[in-house]
Image (tube, rainbow, N blue to C red):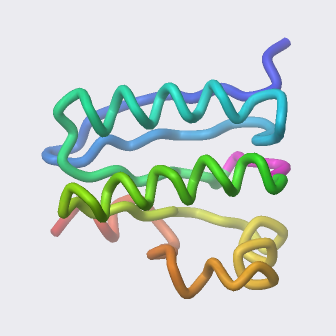
């Protein structure tokens, strides 16, 4: 059984990466690769759907920050959608809620 599944779909200029499972030291490289493929592979903007993410540690946060930095360097948008209370609390406690665009649903960013 995989600890993290990353499913990609494209919606217009957005690459939507749906994360299922745990994002931690063991699985962070899988997300880093998927983000780099999306960001360097033609997707203008990226939104992470974390509604099915059960666990997030500092290594996972580091990958998210790296994706955000790449987006900013390229004038692109980067958003996180569907964070449940536990995941949202991690963003709040670390102060990253001020850096990331956190939305309730993927459609909030891909529709516009």
Q: Is residue 78 left or right of residue 110?
A: right
Instruction: Note whether 36 is above or below 104 in the view shown.
Output: above
The prevailing secondary structure element of the residues shown in magenta is strand
- Left or right? Give the position of 37 relative to 92: left
Figure check: 28 above or below 68: above
Q: Nearer the viewer, residue 61 or 48?
A: 61
Q: Is residue 98 magenta?
A: no
Going 64% across and 54% down the picture, which residue do you hit? 51
Q: Which residue is more in the foreground, 16 or 78?
A: 78
Front position in the image: 108 or 94: 94
Q: Position of residue 27 (x, y in %)?
A: 75, 29
Q: How many marks?
A: 0
Q: In this image, 90 relative to 32: left or right?
A: right
- Residue 20 in the image: state x and y as whole percent: 69, 36
Residue at 55 percent of width and 34 percent of height: 32
Please identify the quarter of the rendering in which residue 108 is found: bottom left
Q: Is residue 17 above or below residue 105?
A: above
User: Which portion, as a residue range, is magenta?
Assistant: 52-56
Q: Is residue 54 magenta?
A: yes
């Amino acid at each position: 059984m995989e600890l993290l599944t990353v499913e990609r779909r494209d919606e217009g200029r957005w690459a939507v990466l749906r994360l299922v499972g745990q994002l931690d030291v063991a699985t962070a490289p899988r997300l880093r690769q998927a983000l780099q493929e999306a960001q360097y592979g033609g997707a203008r903007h990226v939104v992470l759907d974390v509604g099915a993410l059960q666990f997030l540690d500092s290594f996972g946060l580091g990958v998210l920050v790296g994706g955000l930095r790449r987006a900013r360097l390229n004038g692109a948008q980067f958003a996180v959608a569907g964070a449940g209370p536990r995941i949202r609390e991690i963003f709040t406690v670390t102060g990253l809620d001020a850096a990331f665009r956190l939305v309730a649903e993927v459609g909030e960013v891909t529709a516009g």
